[in-house]
Amino acid sequence: MTESTGQARGRSIGRRRGGDRETPPPSPPTPPPHRDASDSVPFGMRIAAAWSWRLLLVGGVIAVIIFLIIQLRLIVIPVLVAVLIGALLVPFSQLLQRHRWPKWLAVTVAMLSALIVVGGLLAVGITFIVRGSGDLAAQSLVAWDEFRAWLLAGPMHITESQLNDFVEQAVASAQQDSSVLVTGALSVGSTLGHFLAGMLLALFATLFILIDGRGIWRWIVGVFPRRARAAVDGAGQAGWATLQNFVKVQILVATIDAIGIGLGAFFLGIPLAVPIAILVFLGSFIPIVGAVVTGALAVFIALVYNGWVIALIMLGIVLLVQQVEGHVLQPLIMGTAVKVHPLGVVVAVATGSLLAGIPGALFAVPVAAVLNVMIVYISGGSWKGDAGPPATEVRSPLWRTVPQRPGYQRGE
């Protein structure tokens, strides 16, 4: 009985153990697969969305910058003028200093030279215009009377009333257009006081660029984070070199235009040839707009004083000079200096004129050229190897070299 009872218990325990192995406990239920809503969006659409919000962000920042520049144009435009003048005068001041001139004397001579040249050109041009203004007005009335008589007696059979209506419409249109032109021309300042204040600010800014350009640039670079200073410093060097090339080439192109049109007016016997050449020189600094306006003025003076035959010849000379500039000087000289495509120049000038009138057209090309060179330099990545200070000096856009202290890093 005892053995049978023990055997029975063992068999029952074995059955229980075997039963446990045969019927394991139920496993927990498997959760349904997780589904993300982004999985249903095509990959191309996600890429487009990522680009879109980044482009919107960049566009918003650019719009804010343009808005601030327009609001602060009374300060921004004189400073930009000073930068352009400084790009021309800084090399001249450095040249004098390399010939052992004292720094203060080199800066003074550079500033006085610029003031004498610009003031002399304006004085000569204004003097000739004032002296010939009365004769020009009288001759314009004579030319208009002759043209009016030809219209009334000519083959087109224009009546007196039709001619009067046309003149009234032309005067009204000219008044509307003149208001737009005056608004654009006075965008630097709406009053004479604003203009004088801007001129003084430009002179002081130019003077400080000549005196302490190195310190100004080091301060600007120091505003950026330490890791970005090498890129900012190198991009600034490239942009400054491009700006210097632009100013030099623009002076050369303006001189060639002025000599060509001025000599043409002189040999044709057109009065006011000297002020015409000066206006062409000054107007050439405004791309496209300045050439058209000054060329039209030369043709108008030729028409008033010398008749339509000489005016047509003068028009041919103006077009020839402009074609030489557009197809020879611009591609060979300006294109090499600033590396901007002619289509980019046209778009930049149109955009600048739309946003800021004549000042916008004046600064459109140099700003586009400098930004283009700086962006290309930063995207190229050549600055990544300049993290440390391997040399004993650091180049700066405004001055040739910047002495480097121990432990100094770019822009620090």
Image (cartoon, grey):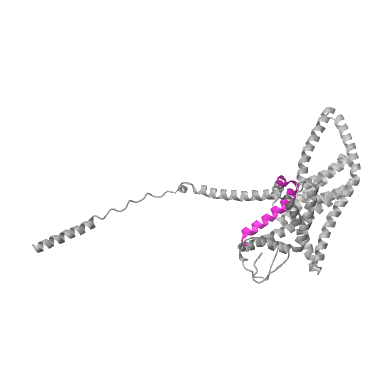
Front residue of 74 and 14: 74
Front residue of 355 and 248: 355
Q: Can residue 299 be seen here?
A: yes
Q: Residue at x 59, y 48 (%)?
A: 56
Which residue in the rendered view is the most extreme toward the front?
Answer: 193
Residue 18 location (% of width, % of height): 20, 58
- Quarter holding the C terminus is bottom right
Residue 16 location (% of width, % of height): 19, 58
Magenta span: helix, strand or loop, mainly?
helix
Residue 94 location (% of width, % of height): 77, 65
Left or right of residue 46, residue 155 in this image: right
Which residues are drawn in magenta? 353-382
Q: Is 355 a magenta residue?
A: yes
Q: Is 254 a magenta residue?
A: no
Placement of 391 over or under 22, stated as above or below: below
Left or right of residue 298, residue 351 in this image: left
Residue 241 location (% of width, % of height): 72, 60
Q: Residue at x 41, y 50 (%)?
A: 34
Front residue of 65 and 59: 65
Q: Can residue 266 be seen here?
A: no
- Quarter holding the N terminus is bottom left
Q: In which quarter of the image is residue 375?
A: bottom right
Q: In which quarter of the image is residue 311?
A: top right
Left or right of residue 363, residue 139 in this image: right
Q: Which residue is drawn at 86% across and 39% down?
A: 308
Q: Residue at x 66, y 51 (%)?
A: 65
